[in-house]
Image (cartoon, helix red, strand yellow):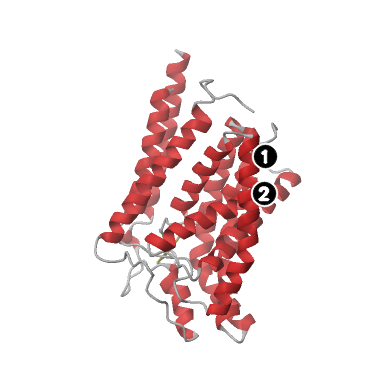
Amino acid sequence: MKKCSLFKLILWFSVSLAVLSSKEVFAMHLSEGILPAKDAIGAGILALPFVIIGLKKIGKSKKENPLYFSMVGLLGAAVFVISAFPIPVPIAGTCSHPAGTGLSAIILGPFPSVVVAAVALLIQALFMAHGGLTTLGANILTMGICGSFCGYFTYKFAKKVGFSPFVSGFFAGVVADITTYAATAFVLAFSLSNDFVTAFLEIGLAFVPTQIPLSILEGVITGFAVRYVFQNRPELLSHGRNMEVQI
Amino acid sequence: MKNLFFTFKSLSKGLLWCILFLLLVFIVSPKKAVAGEEKWPGVDSAVVEKYAKKFGVEPREPFINTDQGDLLLFIFTLAGATGGFVMGYNFRKIFKEKQSGSVSRT
């Protein structure tokens, strides 16, 4: 078993290294200085309560379950790597990245997932020319809040309907990805255009050829990850607090 | 014998994932890229910056601009290595040490 763990550790390490060390780097979050000051500040003010509640929830869950912090570490690193993971989409001829917040929201809960996304986005904005400090609030709003909450509630709904963990995770991943980019289109249209509806549709539709295949890929990854957790540590799917064993 | 079987099974699964990953990389390799001036632009330049420019806004240079020469490559390599290590370490702690009984359930 130790050999297997080491193998998986090396596999994770190698894949992350291979993925993030590509020569061409493409930033897909809202770039630095793209939003007017009032909208950038407004987005930051909107995102702040979610981050504060998330921090409180992480502190509370950490006291209840010592392993919770390891989960935050694992999913924080995963969101960080996934959201800086430029995937080429041959149909569109462009690159984009998944969000990863659907998966983190399912396992950590939506509020802690916002914190995880905020930390990942802050590091990317500071050191990786990926996103921006002035657009941090807007990026937390789109990827952190919209991705996490939409993914989380989709998972809960799919489970209630009776879908398997894989299918529920798949839907959550797809929805988290699509809503992240729909929210990006919303923020851009709201901030930059006087004709909101036309601009929103135009920008939203421009994302479609790249994001639809990518959202399916994110759905598959989320589905497999949720299924793995369900099979090995099902109690984690209730944010590490309650035991939840089904199927 | 049972342990050997599980190790073999896990290794096979790992290999299968490696093959799937390589297959994915092969399928989306740049050779199949759409011919154009710039190959594989990110949706930032293809969509976000394009529409921002259309509405009269130019993106600004990052406050800490690491996009200089191979510096960004170094940062991304470092970030990937660190992220991979953190993921692997915590994955082992949550899923593997629990199986060997060194971490008790709450």
Q: Residue at x 40, y 43 (%)?
A: B84
Identify the secondary structure beneath mark 1: helix
Whether residue A86 can be seen here:
yes
Residue closest to the eye, A37 or A129? A37
Which amino acid, by three-letter code, is at mark 2?
Tyr
First of labels 1, 2 by sequence position: 2
Where, quadrant-wise, is the C terminus of chain A in this rendering? top right
Residue A238: mark: 1
Contact (Cβ within 8 Å) of mark 1 with mark 2: no
In this view, the residue farthest toward the right is: A160
In the displayed structure image, the side of residue A112 where residue B63 appears, left or right: left
Say what secondary structure mark 2 lies in: helix
- Mark 2, residue position: A155
Q: Is residue A32 left or right of residue A25?
A: right
Residue A23 appearing in the image:
no
**Residue B94's x, y, as percent?**
53, 32
Position in image of residue A144 (x %, y %): 57, 58
Q: Position of residue A166 (x, y in %)?
A: 61, 42
> How many angstroms separate mark 1 from mark 2 (CA)?
12 Å
Camera-near label (1 vs 2) is 1
Q: Horizontal and vertical percent for residue A147?
A: 60, 58
What's the residue type where badge 1 is placed?
A: Ser
Q: Is residue A247 above or below residue A166?
A: above
Q: Is residue A184 left or right of residue A149?
A: left
Task: Identify the image quadrant of residue A68.
Answer: top right
Residue B95, numbered circle: none
